[in-house]
Image (cartoon, rainbow, N blue to C red):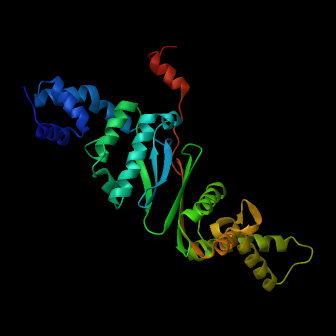
Amino acid sequence: MAFTAADVKALREMTGVGMMDCKKALTESNGDMEAAVVYLREKGLAAAEKKAGRIAAEGMVYANVYPNGVGVVVEVNSETDFVAKNETFQKFVADVASVIAEKNPADVDALMELSFPEGGTVADAQRDKVLVIGENIKIRRFVRYEGGVNVSYIHAGGKVGVLVGMELEGISADAVQELGRDIAMQACAMSPHFLSRADVDQATLDKEREILLVQAKEENKNSAKPKPDAIIEKMVEGRMSKYYAENCLLEQGFVKDDKLTVAKHVEAVAKELGGKITVTKFERMERGDGLEKREDDLAAEVAKLTGGAN
């Protein structure tokens, strides 16, 4: 029995399985829709559903800047670090990033509905890769930069990905590629939470000041020569400067020359190139950050394989 592209689409909508698997199911079942559904449940869908409940906190972060200047950093998780070395998985992640760059989805949910280069939607492709690779795979998050000059950096094969955005005046994009990479590597190594002190929200400042004030008062209480409250307040403000220097990218000591801050290094490069450079934003993604990690129970696995025999 012959089948059409509309039949493949209908089967996909009925089962939620990727288009290629639906086509194969219809081929194997000679176009019989009910038989194709049974085939998918036996061969594909059940396996995918089972894997979908497993913890995915490994995988990789991918960052890239495309010919049109758009920059993307995306995290795609798998169950094991081994999968990050799989070429099929790596290509899937790169293709997902290209879709983000081209289509500018609002969020992951919108991304999943977009067309994928290999056919079907991104959601279809993700389900296909679960079946092919044999692990749960999830697109977790992404950031997309458009406009200005963007530079990307990937560390340790996808453990960390960084995107840096800059605005230039009187300087070419090619001239700042090394600077952008240096800043991205700085963000990777030093893990700043903010671009500058102006970006630190008031709630964070209040909490940090409160902690530092308690610490200073405790130190003062145990001091042989207690200091007046006015001095304590100055101590706290001094320690807040250290907080900015540790947590704000532009105020950190530049890793290649710690006599300069990152901001001063940017100024020096701009002066040398005869223009103006403004670092406007950055995004640092670390694989699995904040996710529950999978913990394999060897004894349980052995018991499962041996049917629980002692």
Q: From the viewer's perspective, is 196 left or right of 150? A: right
Q: From the viewer's perspective, is 75 left or right of 243? A: left
**Residue in front for this viewpoint, 204 or 11:** 11
Residue 165 lies, in percent from the top left, at: 52, 66
Q: Is residue 266 above or below residue 78?
A: below
Residue at 66 percent across and 58 percent down: it is 190
Q: Is residue 40 above or below residue 285?
A: above
Residue 39 lies, in percent from the top left, at: 20, 26
**Residue in front for this viewpoint, 191 or 296:** 191
**Residue in front for this viewpoint, 292 or 2:** 2
Q: Is residue 169 above or below residue 86?
A: below
Residue at 20 percent across and 39 percent down: it is 12
- Rendering quarter of residue 203: bottom right
**Residue in front for this viewpoint, 88 or 136:** 88
- Rendering quarter of residue 69: bottom left
Residue 164 lies, in percent from the top left, at: 54, 62
Residue at 31 percent across and 50 percent down: it is 112
Residue 240 lies, in percent from the top left, at: 71, 74
Q: From the viewer's perspective, is 223 left or right of 278? A: right
Residue 192 visible in the picture: no
Residue 205 visible in the picture: yes
Residue at 18 percent across and 27 percent down: it is 38
Q: Which residue reaches farthest bottom?
A: 230
Q: Which quadrant: the N terminus?
A: top left
- Rendering quarter of residue 144: bottom left
Q: Which residue reaches farthest left?
A: 1
